[in-house]
Image: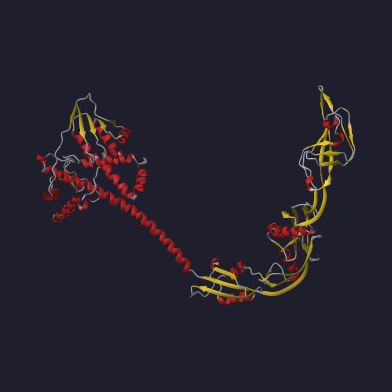
């Protein structure tokens, strides 16, 4: 017959295993309600699995929680949704618990402490230490604690602590608090409640009044202690008729669990914070020591003013795009010519007027559908439009004969220019059909005809609007005002960086302008297109400095000296460009200083370890040094440090 235990939601693993020990049935069903603490404790389930195998019992977990069943299966426990129907099952009797009054609980606590102080019999081991009688078995808590520690050793390579870190992050708690809560869950230890705190305080008050028993003999301190074995205790409460003794046992169990938790927490906390404190303290000590050494050790700072000589020079130079390097003998330097072209077009109204007497003109295609014979038409042959306007051919033509294809006549044709018979706008007729007046009244009248594909144009009589010269000039000036700024911007954007452009070394000009229609042509509007060009001669100012150095210094400038130009730099004047030849002539004036170079590294090695007077003597022997200023730190130091790393040298110019 199988045994069924109905677990409570908060029932811990210690209570479940104690039930397993007490039952004589080999098959046990554990019915876990929703939210059962056991289903959330994977290590507790492993403890249950190990103990069931040791006792030779088959444990089946009954739970509706799918996650809980999967956790049970993961550790090797059988799990089901409901109890089987084909087995004989003995259900556990429902136990009735009674809450103990606080006064009675405190009395039991006092008796428990006294009993522990005066408990007999005791046996003394070989080392002289007091031992509990080994007749009684160990308590449930101690046994399960040992099992939990064994399981935890097997879990060293597991990811449980990684899960603990993730839980700590998600809950916002510290890692240590989360880990200790998991240890409580594994070992079946409840959190300390207020009533337990009162019990502990009361126990300490009573214990203080009793004499402290000797635990070992002073002469035998090296012998291993033997752990005291308490009487067996029960985690579950007893029925109402068995209150007194079970309540004492329950108190012992809670007390032992709490002491175990407190001991572990203190050990781990002390170890963690001791290590952290040592690391922080050691790091701080190293930093403070380094800072102290840095500031305590002496150092020296020397500011050297090098020797200088004022110079001034003005020369005429020629920048030439035809050379590629400096010619110091001719004062020539390379130049670069840049040219940018740009075009602009705008439309304008024509405002000029002129008396006109012009005839319309156009082109007509003459067709021959009469015969295969060619037909000649003399110059000034009249062709009449559909509205009766007469146009004449400008030359004599011969219209080819028609072709006969498949018994049908296919017309041939020939184009001819025509001019209106009279001047005037009315002859600007649209495209259409024309007849040849000379064939009127003959069969050829309908077989010979003309067709214009475009309108006649140009006919005018009286005053008409034309493009005047004034219109052209104004339009050109207007286009240049638009073109010049954009040309200047585009041209300057193409100047390479590092090249110098002088005032007067560039020009911008408008080129040839074109008007459509041209000046004097009849039109209401016209367009004007203008081409602009920008040209500039550039040079590299470094080449100018190179030439000036050669002219200024001569033998004065060498590897030990350099030329420093004043803030106003080089002054240019008399610029004369020749864009055709690509040459630019100009004058350049420069003023500055020739500065002697100081070998700071050599000076640093030379003055190391010397006192102030010795340093002054050393400086007086260097012609490149005009003057020097020294300062030492700390204030009591009167000599330069021997270490060159503690000597700082800088240059200062007047």
Q: Is residue 412 visible?
A: no
User: In this view of the protein, which residue sits in the foreground, 370 or 248?
Assistant: 370
| Quarter of the picture holding the C terminus | bottom right
Name the foreground residue: 466 vs 510. 466
Of 273 and 344, nearer the camera is: 344
Q: Position of residue 113 (x, y in %)?
A: 14, 50
- What colour-coding does the image apply? secondary structure
Note whether 531 is above or below 158 in the view shown.
Answer: below
| Vertical arrangement, residue 495 with respect to residue 444, above or below | below
Image-quadrant location for residue 463: bottom right
Q: Quadrant of residue 542?
A: bottom right
Q: Is residue 476 above or below residue 567?
A: above
Q: Position of residue 176 (x, y in %)?
A: 32, 49
Residue at figure coordinates x 22%, y 30% from the top left: 28
Give the residue at the far left of this rendering. 241
Quadrant for the N terminus, please: top left
Q: Tell me residue 324's x, y (percent).
A: 77, 58
In the figure, is residue 297 to the left or right of 66? right
Q: Residue furthest front?
A: 441
Label total for image: 0
Which residue corresponds to the image point at 33% horizontal and 52% vertical from the top-left?
Answer: 271
Tell me if 435 is positioned left or right of 645 in this view: right
Residue 295 appears in view? yes
Residue furthest to the bottom: 613
- Relative image position of residue 43 (x, y in whole percent): 30, 39
Q: Residue at x 61, y 68 (%)?
A: 600
């Amino acid at each position: 017959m199988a045994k069924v235990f109905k677990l409570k939601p908060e029932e811990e693993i210690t209570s479940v295993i104690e039930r397993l020990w007490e039952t004589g049935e080999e098959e046990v069903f554990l019915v876990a309600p929703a939210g059962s603490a056991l289903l959330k404790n994977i290590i507790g389930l492993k403890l249950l699995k190990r103990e069931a195998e040791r006792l030779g019992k088959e444990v089946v977990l009954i739970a509706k929680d799918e996650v809980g069943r999967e956790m049970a299966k993961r550790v090797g426990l059988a799990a089901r949704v409901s109890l089987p129907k084909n087995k004989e099952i003995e259900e556990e009797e429902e136990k009735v618990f009674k809450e103990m009054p606080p006064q009675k609980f405190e009395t039991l606590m006092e008796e428990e402490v006294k009993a522990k102080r005066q408990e007999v019999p005791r046996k003394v081991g070989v080392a002289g230490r007091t031992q509990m009688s080994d007749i009684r078995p160990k308590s449930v808590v101690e046994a399960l604690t040992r099992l939990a520690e064994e399981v935890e050793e097997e879990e060293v390579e597991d990811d449980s602590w990684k899960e603990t870190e993730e839980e700590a992050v998600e809950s916002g708690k510290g890692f240590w608090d989360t880990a200790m809560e998991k240890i409580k869950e594994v070992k079946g230890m409840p959190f300390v409640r207020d009533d337990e705190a009162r019990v502990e305080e009361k126990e300490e008050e009573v214990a203080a009044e009793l004499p402290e028993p000797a635990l070992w003999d002073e002469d035998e301190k090296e012998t291993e202690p033997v752990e005291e074995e308490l009487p067996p205790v029960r985690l579950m409460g007893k029925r109402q008729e068995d209150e007194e003794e079970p309540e004492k046992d329950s108190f012992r169990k809670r007390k032992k669990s709490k002491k175990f938790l407190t001991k572990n927490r203190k050990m781990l906390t002390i170890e963690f914070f001791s290590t952290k404190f040592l690391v922080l303290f050691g790091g701080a000590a190293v930093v403070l020591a380094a800072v102290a050494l840095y500031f305590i050790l002496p150092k020296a700072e020397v500011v050297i003013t090098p020797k200088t000589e004022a110079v001034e020079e003005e020369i005429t130079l020629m920048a030439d795009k035809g050379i590629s390097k400096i010619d110091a003998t001719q004062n020539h330097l390379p130049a670069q010519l840049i040219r940018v072209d740009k075009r602009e077009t705008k439309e304008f109204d024509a405002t000029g007027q002129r008396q006109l007497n012009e005839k319309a003109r156009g082109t007509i295609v003459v067709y021959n559908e009469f015969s295969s014979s060619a037909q000649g038409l003399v110059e000034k042959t009249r062709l009449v439009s559909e509205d009766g306007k007469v146009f004449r051919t400008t030359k004599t033509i011969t219209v080819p004969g028609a072709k006969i294809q498949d018994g049908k006549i296919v017309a041939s044709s020939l184009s001819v220019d025509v001019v209106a018979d009279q001047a005037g706008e009315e002859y600007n007729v649209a495209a259409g059909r024309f007849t040849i007046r000379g064939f009127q009244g003959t069969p050829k009248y309908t077989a010979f005809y003309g067709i214009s594909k475009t309108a006649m144009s140009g006919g005018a009589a009286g005053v008409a609007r034309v493009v005047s010269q004034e219109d052209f000039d104004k339009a050109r000036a207007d286009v240049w005002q638009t073109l010049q700024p954009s040309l200047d911007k585009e041209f300057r954007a193409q100047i390479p960086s590092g090249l110098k452009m002088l005032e007067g070394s560039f020009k911008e000009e408008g080129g040839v302008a074109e008007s459509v229609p041209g000046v004097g042509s009849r039109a209401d509007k016209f367009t004007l297109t203008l081409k602009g060009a920008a040209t500039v001669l550039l040079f590299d100012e470094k080449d100018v400095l190179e030439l000036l150095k050669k002219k200024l210094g001569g033998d004065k400038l060498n590897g030990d000296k350099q030329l420093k130009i004043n803030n106003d730099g080089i002054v240019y004047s008399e610029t004369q460009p020749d864009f055709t030849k690509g040459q630019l002539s100009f004058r350049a004036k420069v003023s500055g200083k020739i500065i002697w170079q100081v070998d700071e590294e050599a000076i640093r090695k030379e003055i190391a370890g010397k006192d102030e007077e010795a340093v002054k003597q050393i400086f007086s022997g260097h012609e490149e040094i005009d003057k020097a200023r020294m300062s030492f730190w700390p204030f009591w130091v009167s000599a330069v440090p021997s270490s060159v790393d503690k000597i700082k040298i800088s240059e200062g110019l007047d």
